[in-house]
Image: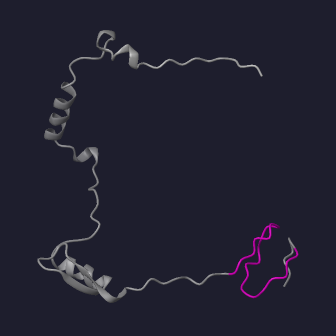
Amino acid sequence: MTCEKCGKVLQVGEWPLCGGKHRHGVAQPMQIIGDDVPGGFVVENGFSSPQKFYSKSAHRKALDAKGLRMGAGKPKRSWASTDAQTLENARKLVERVTTQPTKSTSPDPSLTMRFEWRDVTC
């Protein structure tokens, strides 16, 4: 078979559509990631003593049996779940700022930066 756009003779398994840009490639088989772990792996976290597992699912089942899970991450927070104590704590944090910086409290003038624009002729 020959590509109608670029004229390349296609081999078995090549992608037939290139849009005229010679982008023909061979399809790659999907890689299947197995559950088993040859030789096993030792887990020390979550158990009173190190445990050895020979599959990822066995590790998950052991964690489930203890009421644990991997990758719990951050809990989702919404404004609907904000309680009165959280709002009170936020109010106290905001009130800590008592003064706004003024010219009299500005940093040392020698630490300021100055920018200039110049036209340079060559």
> In the rendered view, would you say 80 is above or below 89?
below
Magenta stretch holds residue 13:
yes
Q: Could you tell me which residue is drawn at 28 percent across and 56 percent down?
A: 74
Q: Could you tell me which residue is drawn at 22 percent across and 28 percent down?
A: 94
Whether residue 110 sits left or right of residue 26 in the image: it is left
Secondary structure mostly seen in magenta is loop
Nearer the observer, 88 or 92 = 92
Q: How is the image coloured?
A: one colour
Q: Which residues are magenta?
A: 7-26
> In the rendered view, would you say 107 is above or below 20?
above
Q: Could you tell me which residue is drawn at 34 percent across and 10 percent down?
A: 103
Residue 111, quarter of the rendered image: top left
Q: Quadrant of the N terminus?
A: bottom right
Residue 27, quarter of the rendered image: bottom right
Magenta stretch holds residue 19:
yes
> In the rendered view, would you say 22 is above or below 118?
below
